[in-house]
Amino acid sequence: MSKRSYADFTSKDATSVSQILEHAEDLLRAAKALKQELETVRDAPEANDQIILVLARHNKKILPTAQLLVQDETSAAERHKAASSKIQKLNHSNESSEDATAALIIPAPVSLTRWTPQDIPSSGMPPLPPVLDPILEQAALTHSGMVARPTDMSYERLEWLGDAYLYLMATSFIYQTFSSLSAGRCSQLRERLIKNETLHNYTIQYGINKRTRFPAEFGLHGRIGGTQASQTAKKKVLGDVFESYVAAVILGDTEGLPRVAAWMKSLWSKLLAHEIQKEYNSRPRLMHDHLSIDGRDYKNEKDPKQDLSPKTLLVQVIGTKGVKLSYTDVGEPKKDKHSKLPWYTVAVFYDGLGERNLQLGVGSALSKKEAGANAARYALENKTLIKRLQTKKEEARKSAELAESVQQEYDNWS
């Protein structure tokens, strides 16, 4: 039987692939619509009853669409059974890389949820997930200069794919976890996770580098009588190998993507442990402790479901006529120890009602906006000071009401 070329594969299966993509788009749209409606009823009274109705309505679209994808999987498996059975070894003389391409499995979808302190390993590194497909494992660890033929698979194409998966996963974890962080600050966190130095270190720590097949110039002493790769080139290629290994795990079986997502979530959480813990600690404190500081609930009048920012909350708690809150840079310029970017320190000051230049709190961050928000947050945590300023606010309110009452009586008498 003649081998099936890549051209034959694409021409015969283009229609079926388009159909699968169409079904996948339908499922994504239906799931998105369900998510949006669930978010609107999440905090509503008798939410459970409404959730049941929402699920029943949307499942009429989601379940049939999911069933179509199951049928697509069955059809694809039957169509490629013969081609897939041919692939036994990466360098088998009667096979080509097109056979391996045709046999790659479409990964199962996965939900990427926010980090919590529980995701941070207490010690050590999370276990390295194995590559369940030996062909992909060998390809992920093999340099293109070490393959028998140009058509054989190497780490380079897998590295390109793994890079995309890591970029998307890092973006999603950060987006889900740090809801109030600016896009620029989110990009800084993502860079820490996916930069070559980070991935190179992972390759060394897991010992993946000891399993690679690379030309001699990448070895400790270089090629005998020849060239030696620079340290920069060695670090770059070992970072790339980590990305290719990630892709090989994902493509190795249908549950590869969920396994990699759980692994990277745990692995990356060690790198951002400080930021994750800080975010986790700050959210409930603002939502529960400070919204009723003076015995009344402070709500966002435009959108009651949205949390108030620390600056806005501070104004509502102690702000009144004749009071000014100002935010000013303090301290010497510093650099963040992780990103080496400028580290800003901002203090919030109170003027009015007999107080002058009273410092309420100090906060630091990689942006002045975030540092100011932290300063307001720390000010709100000083309950003794806040209580004293609230007393001044209440006394000023009563004095203003008394003055208005006296003026009204005088106007009526005259």
Image (tube, rainbow, N blue to C red):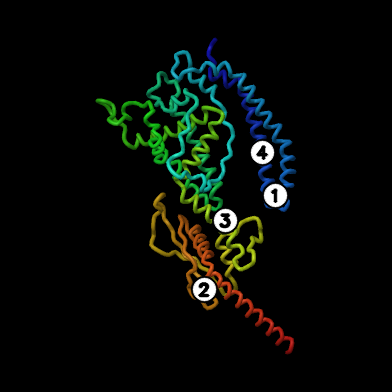
Residue placed at 53% from the left, 56% from the top? Answer: 282
**CA separation, marks 3 and 4?**
32 Å
Of the numbered discs 2 and 1, the one sitting upstream in the chain is 1
Of the numbered discs 2 and 3, the one sitting upstream in the chain is 3
Q: Which residue is mark 1?
A: 41
The image position of residue 66, as x and y in percent, is: 67, 32
Q: Amino acid at mark 2?
A: Asp
Q: Amino acid at mark 3?
A: Pro
Q: Verify CB contact (< 8 Å) between mark 2 and mark 3.
A: no
The image position of residue 263, as x and y in percent, is: 49, 37
In the rendered image, the vertical position of residue 405 relative to residue 114, given as above or below:
below
Q: Which residue is mark 2?
A: 351
Q: Indicate the quadrant containing the N terminus: top left, top right, bottom left or bottom right.
A: top right
Of the numbered discs 1 and 3, the one sitting upstream in the chain is 1
Q: Which residue is mark 4?
A: 29
Which one is closest to the eye, mark 2 or mark 1?
A: 1
Find numbered disc 3 in the image and state the secondary structure of the residue it sits on. helix
Residue placed at 52% from the left, 19% from the top? Answer: 99
How crowded is the residue under tag 2: few (<14 C-alpha within 10 Å), some, or many (20+)? some
**CA separation, marks 2 and 1?**
42 Å
**CA separation, marks 2 and 3?**
29 Å
